[in-house]
Image (cartoon, rainbow, N blue to C red):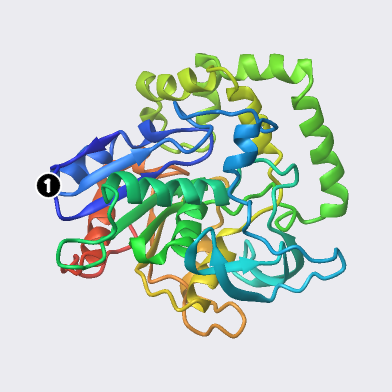
Amino acid sequence: IFSGPADATKSALLIHGLFVNADHWRRTIRELGDAGYRTYAIDLLGSGYSSKPSPGSLEARLLNGENGRFETYPKNEVSCDRYYSNHRGKQDQYLQRPIRDNLILGTASGGRKIVKHVNLRHPLGSCYNFYTFAEQVSDFTRDVIFEGTDQLPDGTQKTTSLVANSKGTIVALQAVLDTPEYYDGVCAINPTYREMHHAEMRFPSIMMPVVNLLQKFLRSKQGKDLYYHATQRDCIKNILKEPYNNIDAIDDELVTAMMDPLNLPNAAEVVFDELSYTTGPLFEQLLQDIKSASIRKPLWVCYGVEDPWLSPNRVESLMTTPFGKQAAPVVDKVVAIANAGHCPHDERPEITNPIILDFLKTCKGMKASIGIPHL
């Protein structure tokens, strides 16, 4: 979906979170368009009304974003050394080993911890991974937003701004790493720290077998029956009461926007597959990678302080506590939004949209509002 003048010189791309779709930006896209930005929101592969190839199909294997991205080494070589090479014909792409070693991550208290081995590949080899989604975003940017050409008539590189929520925040950062020339900034709204990722589990040796059993159950007939009941109107409305602090925002329009795509063919298979994604890149890892690659873009984070899945101390530490030898903050601004949960763009658009517009002004080199407070 899109909004704003077709001849606008400024643009933005909105990237949704887990199990929702482009319609989740219903309270944002029109306001950005009215402000003069050509604004797009997409359905990531497997979400909303996008294609949903079976994870084991030929189509899924061919479009998998992990293809050609990782070097193959003997299993005992787990160093996270990375080096420049060509990746799918693009220059200056990282070709990396599938294991990241001694990765520094945040903690709920705002501290830091070191995780020895982080597997970047999907455990099932599925196409529903962050690399596939990032390539989709970059392809959409080039083919739709840039209309097939990367440069303006005067030779200037075209750019757009990324605004993302939850799962989409990791997609956005990975897209910036893949094609940094396409983007002039990222605004991450309630980033996901992926609690089901093995690096985020407190006792992975104990928890992973439990998670594996749960995933096996979900793929059984009983699990599919459970999925059917979970994707009905009343159940979706009740489920949304956990991430949403503003219950009034859970209206029939939102429930329908979620329910209808989740009942399309192959949707259940995609959901179960994404619930099996206990590996792959992490938000703080990608922030560090962007800094290490000397990619200079405005990076903002805003978050609802009532998000049950997010620690305010961990988010705020992005500005205050370095990751290892990186003394400088990995983001440029952190903005807290009171009385909002995991989706402040839908719960408190009257607060969140002005923040997004200020971010966009920063990306486009215009003067933003002075000193956004913690609201």
- Left-right relation of 52 to 103: left
Vertical placement of residue 198 versus 212, above or below: below
| Percent x, y of residue 108 | 62, 61
Q: Nearer the viewer, residue 171 or 239?
A: 171
Q: Quadrant of the N terminus?
A: top left
Q: Amino acid at mark 1?
A: Asp
- Quarter where residue 333 is shown: bottom left
Residue drawn at the location 81% of the way across and 30% of the way down: 216
Picture coordinates of residue 165, whole percent (x, y):
44, 47
Quarter of the image for residue 6 reads top left
Q: Nearer the viewer, residue 137 or 166?
A: 137
Residue at 77 percent of width and 56 percent of height: 202
Which quadrant: the C terminus?
Answer: bottom left
Q: Indicate the position of residue 111 as horizontal and vertical percent values.
A: 63, 71
Q: Is residue 206 visible?
A: yes
For the point 37% across and 45% down, the residue is 140
- For this view, does 267 lie left or right of residue 374? right
Q: Give coordinates of residue 119: x percent, y percent.
A: 73, 58
Determine which residue is flagged by label 1.
Answer: 7
Q: Is residue 370 above or below residue 123?
A: below
Residue 334 seen from this side:
no
User: 304 left or right of 94?
Assistant: left
